[in-house]
Amino acid sequence: MRKFILKLLLLFIAFAAHAQKGQLVIQKGSTLNYTLYLHGQQVAFELKVKHLQDSLVLDWKMRNTTSGTYVILHQALLKADKLNFVQPEANRVYVLPSDQTFFMISKSAFNHMLQYKNFVYDNTVYQLDTNRHLPATNLSNSEAWNTLHVIAQNETTELWILNNPDFPLICRIKGNPLGIDMILNTIK
């Protein structure tokens, strides 16, 4: 009986470890490395999480030469309905308006997506893709994490959003009519 209980306990521990393997936690100090595709050009873009209390502070670097800071206000993290695509300016702290996020959607948009299978951002309706199974987005070290795929209605844009209600990070944009696509390569 002891052996059975021990085996059962080990099985539960292994299952819990496997379930957490795909769970991605982004915290202060996390570094997100993207590739941006800007009108046919490819650019390395790095975001580092500097602050997560009240507001979100992201330091950015482009091509490891130019840098600056984005601040996403607490109100925006909760209820924004627009993405900011303004080209970053070197050595500038850019505080986004309370209705805008950067490289993520708001918690209210994410929760709406889970509940109603859609959300509105930038006056565009994004529909959760539940019709086909897509593989999860992959990190460069081949570990997968859980993303949700959404498709813009009446437009070409597709987003892959981290399935994390606390940090609904956009991991990939494809078909953006502004000509700015991106993919997350690594998280450190």
Image (spheres, rainbow, N blue to C red):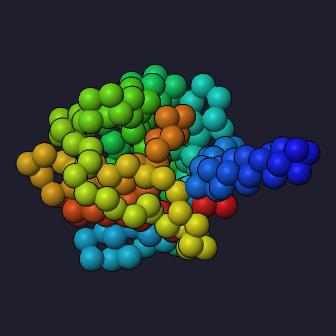
The percent coordinates of residue 151 (x first, y second) are: 22, 50
Please name the residue shown 81% across and 52% down the image.
7
The percent coordinates of residue 92 (x first, y second) are: 52, 48
Please name the residue shown 73% across and 46% down the image.
12
Image: 7 above or below 134: above
> In this orientation, which residue lies closer to the viewer: 182 or 115?
115
Please name the residue shown 18% across and 48% down the image.
152
Image: 76 above or below 184: above
The percent coordinates of residue 144 (x first, y second) are: 53, 63
Residue 140 appears in view: yes
Give the quarter of the figure containing the N terminus: top right
Residue 76 appears in view: no
Whether residue 20 sits left or right of residue 46 in the image: it is: right
Among the 4 quarters of the image, the one containing residue 127? top left
Residue farthest to the bottom, as pictured: 41
Please name the residue shown 57% across and 30% down the image.
55
